Amino acid sequence: MGQGASGGAEGLPGWCHLIRADNPSPMTLEGTNTYVLSTSAGNVVIDPGPLIEDHLRAVASLGAVALTVLTHHHPDHTESAQRFHQHTGAPVTALDPDLCIDTEPVSDDEQIAIPDLDLRVLHTPGHTADSICLEVRRGSWRGLLCGDTILGRGTSVVAHPDGQLGAYLDSLARLRDRLSGDWMLLPAHGPVRADAVGVIEQYIAHRHARLDEVRAALASGATSAREVVEIVYSDVDRSVWPAAERTVAAALDYLTGAEKPTNAAGE
């Protein structure tokens, strides 16, 4: 069942709605956040989420849908996309053409044509190769819909081998350099944050601190991602160790120069 939050919840403006899916887990935190942006041409839905019918009904109940946008391919964001399209008739777009339904994929720095909003796509690879963020401006309000690139609490996974740490650090630096002033952070998991730039700076510092810890673990004799996790993440719930192992594998590729370039299509 959707854990609905109407417009204005968590400090959001009245035209921006957050509906949280009932799929809590160590990886999804309280659940997947679906955002609904109301415009005079219909709603723009960001990440319809898992295939939970009550959740989809809650999202659709907010009005006609003009467009659905997927921030990346992970199923807790995309599993319901086909069903939601069947229910609403709205096209579905993403960076990856394979995720799109009845429309073309978006591209980096593209401005999505929708009334009332300045909605711009930023390709931000790292969590996955196809991850995007969306800059949203309406009047004086500014927000960053950031998918899993940045979470509302804790830190995101660099989902190796699809995700790469070098690309992730570049994406965080790009976001930090683009945003100035009062930007809200609208993550796909966890609470909305009012201090977008501060959170991004914390993420960058955290990643560099983790790299130092990985280097130290290697120097102490660790020879695999699993052995590094056992040292660096010894105080972390073991239920997230598999995800931590993927992030460490990405760090090892980064440190050894084994990363492969990510192109503009997220491939």
Image (cartoon, grey):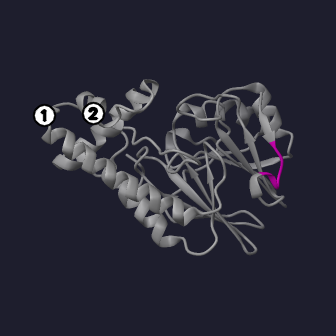
Q: Verify CB contact (< 8 Å) between mark 1 and mark 2.
A: no
On screen, residue 246 versus residue 143, left or right, reads left
Across and down, in percent, residue 91 comes to 68, 45
Q: Quadrant of residue 47?
A: top right
Q: Quadrant of the N terminus?
A: top right
Name the secondary structure under disc 2: helix
Decide: is 200 above or below 25: below
Amino acid identity at mark 2: Ile
Most common secondary structure along the magenta stretch: loop
The residue where tag 2 is placed is 231
Q: Residues within 10 Å of mark 1 (few under 14, many from 20)?
A: few
Determine the CA span between mark 1 and mark 2.
Answer: 10 Å
Three-letter code for the amino acid on which mark 1 is drawn: Gly
In the image, taking residue 28 as reference, residue 267 lies left or right, namely left
Q: Residue at x 63, y 67 (%)?
A: 183
Tell me the residue that label 1 is attached to: 221
